[in-house]
Amino acid sequence: MMRIAIELTYLISSILFIFGIKYLSSPKTARKGNLYAAIGMFLAIAATLLDQEVLTFEWIIIGAIIGSFIGILLAVKTPMTGMPQMVGMLNGFGGGASTLVALSEYFKLNPNYPVDTGIPFDLPVDTGIAIVLSLLIGGVTFTGSMIAFGKLQGLVTGKVVKYPLQHPFNLFLILLVLAGGVFILFNPSNIIIVLIITFISLVLGVLLVLPIGGADMPVAISLLNSYSGLAGSTTGFVLGNNELIIAGALVGASGIILTNIMCKAMNRSLMNVVMGGWASAGAEGPAVESKIHKGTVKSVDAEELAMLLESISSLIIVPGYGMAVGQAQHAVRDLMNVLEKKGVKVRFAIHPVAGRMPGHMNVLLAEAQVPYDKLLAMEDINEDFSNTDAVIVIGANDVVNPAARHDQSSPIYGMPILNVDYAKTVIINKRSLNVGYAGIDNELFFYPNALMYFGDSKSAMSELVKQLSGANS
Amino acid sequence: MESFLFLMHVYVFVLAIFVGFELITKVPPTLHTPLMSGSNAISGITIIGAILSAGLEQFTISTILGMIAVIFAMINVVGGFLVTDRMLKMFKKPSRPGSERK
C-alpha cells in the first residue's frame, strides 16, 4: 500500500517537473514553473523518506543540512555575472551525486563486502551496465564541470589547451572504462576494477574539458548540463526508479538542444568544439595574419560620441562577453534610459553565443532592469540593422565580424553574425584592438562607417551617459 | 521478468526524451540561462538514490557514500531552484515604456 502511494507521488512529481519546464516557455509564467518543479522535488524527497528501505535518518539529515546550507549560500552570494560558473558547479554536484549513488549501490549489492560471506555475487546484467554508465557519465560530469567552473572563474586557463596524443589517449581511456565495465559484468566482486573505472572517469572529465577554450564554454556548459541529466537517468536504471529516468531524460534533452543551438550559432560541429576549438585550424592559423588590414581606425571620445548620439533616432546595442567582464550592464541600462528620454528607439541584439553560457546577456540585462521585450534574438533583428542609425557594440568581436559572411579563408566563415556593419554608424567599444577568441582581425574596425570607442566597458558607458545628460541640462 | 522490467524503463526513458525535446524547443533564448539552472536543479533528483543509500539500516561504506551524495544532490537542488528563482524574479516587463527607475 505504502509502495503504491510512494510510486504515485513520484508520478505526480514527474508531472510537476514537466509542467515546470513547460511554464519556462514564457518569462511571465517562468517563475511559477520553477516553483512547480521545486514542489515536485519536495514531494519526491518526502516520498522517498517514507520508503521502507530508509531506516536511519541521521545521516540523511546531516547531509541535507550541509547541502542546503551550501546551496543557499551559493544561490544568494553568486553575482549575476558569475552565473555561468554557478551553473557549471551545480552540474558537477549533480554528476558527483550520481557517481556516489552508483558506487554506494554497488557496495550495497555486493554480498562479499565488507566481509567475505562466500555468497556468489550475482549482479544482473542491466544493473551492472547501468552502474558502469553512471560511474562513467557521473564522473565525467563531476570533474568536467569543476574544470569548466575553474575556467570561468579564472582559476584554470581559459585558453585552448593541447597536449600530444590528446585524442588517441582520451579514446583509449574511454575504451578502458568500457573494457572494465564488461569485466565487471562477469566478475562483479572485483572492487578494485570498480574503483579504477571510477578513477578513470574522473580523469576523463578533466581531460575532456581542459582543451575547450573560454568562448566555447556555452557549448561545454550545455553539454555538461546534458550529461548531468543523463547521469540522473542512468542512476534511475540502477535503482529501477522511473522518476529519476524521466527527470534525467528531460534535463538530458534540454542540454542536448542547447548544445545544438550553440554549435549552430558558431557554424561548427560538436566534434570540432569538443576537440579543442578554432585553434585546431592549427597550421593555417598564422597564415591568416598575412591579411592584416592596412587601413586606419577612427577613434572617438565620449564627448564626440555623445554629440553623434544626440542626432540619432534609432540605436541597437550589441552586448558581448566584454560587458559581463566589465560589469557594465547597469551603465548600459543608464545609457538606454538617457537616450530613450531623448526619443531614441533603443533595442538590444543578442547573439546566441554572446557571453559564456546560453542566455548569459539576457540575465545580465534583466538584472539591470532592461525589459526583456527590448532584447531581440539574432534572427529577429538582423533585418533591422540596415535601417538603424547607430549600433553600439560592447565587448563583442567575432560575432560581428563581417568576414564570416564573405571571406572564405576566414576560420569563422559561415558563422551566423549580427549584421551591424549595415547600420549607418557602428560604434565599437573595446579595450584595445586585440583579436577576439577566434584569433583573427576584425575588418569591421576598419570600415568607413565604424568608430572605435576605446575603454573599459563600464567606465566608457558611464562617461558617455554623463556627457549625454550634461548636454541635456 | 527482470529484463521485461528493464525494457519498461527504457520505454519511459525514450518517451521522456521526446517530451523533453517538445518542451524545451519552446523555451525562448532569453530564458536559456534559467532553463539551465532550473533543469539542473531537476537533475538533483538523484537525491532519491542518495537518500536510499544514506538511510540504510546498517552503517557501511554505502551510508558514507550516500551521505556525501545527499550533500551534493542537496546543493544541486537547493542552489539550483533558489538561483533560478532569483534570476526569474528579475525578468519583468515594465508597465510603461521608459520606466523611471534609477
Image (cartoon, coloured by chain):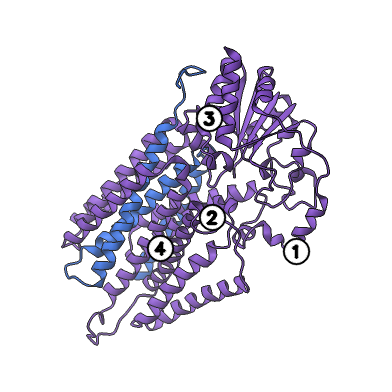
Chain colours: A purple, B blue
Residue under label 4, please give it.
A234
- The mark that comes first in sequence, 4 or 3, is 4
Measured as percent of width and height from the top left, residue A473 is found at: 57, 12
Residue at horizontal 38%, vertical 76%?
Answer: A195
Viewer-side residue, A128 vs A343: A343
Residue under label 1, please give it.
A283
Q: Mark 1 lies on which chain?
A: A
- The mark that comes first in sequence, 4 or 1, is 4
Residue under label 2, please give it.
A220
Viewer-side residue, A285 vs B83: A285
- The mark that comes first in sequence, 1 or 2, is 2
Mark 4 vs mark 1, foreground winner is 1
Mark 4 vs mark 2, foreground winner is 2
Q: Left or right: where does residue A50 sit relative to residue A245?
A: left
Measured as percent of width and height from the top left, residue A110 is found at: 28, 77
Outermost residue to the bottom: A118
Q: Left or right: where does residue A105 sit relative to residue A295?
A: left
Q: How far apart are marks 3 and 1 (CA)?
A: 41 Å
- The mark that comes first in sequence, 2 or 3, is 2
Residue A452 quadrant: top right
Viewer-side residue, B7 vs B101: B101
Q: Distance between the residues labelled 4 and 2?
A: 21 Å
Residue under label 3, please give it.
A331
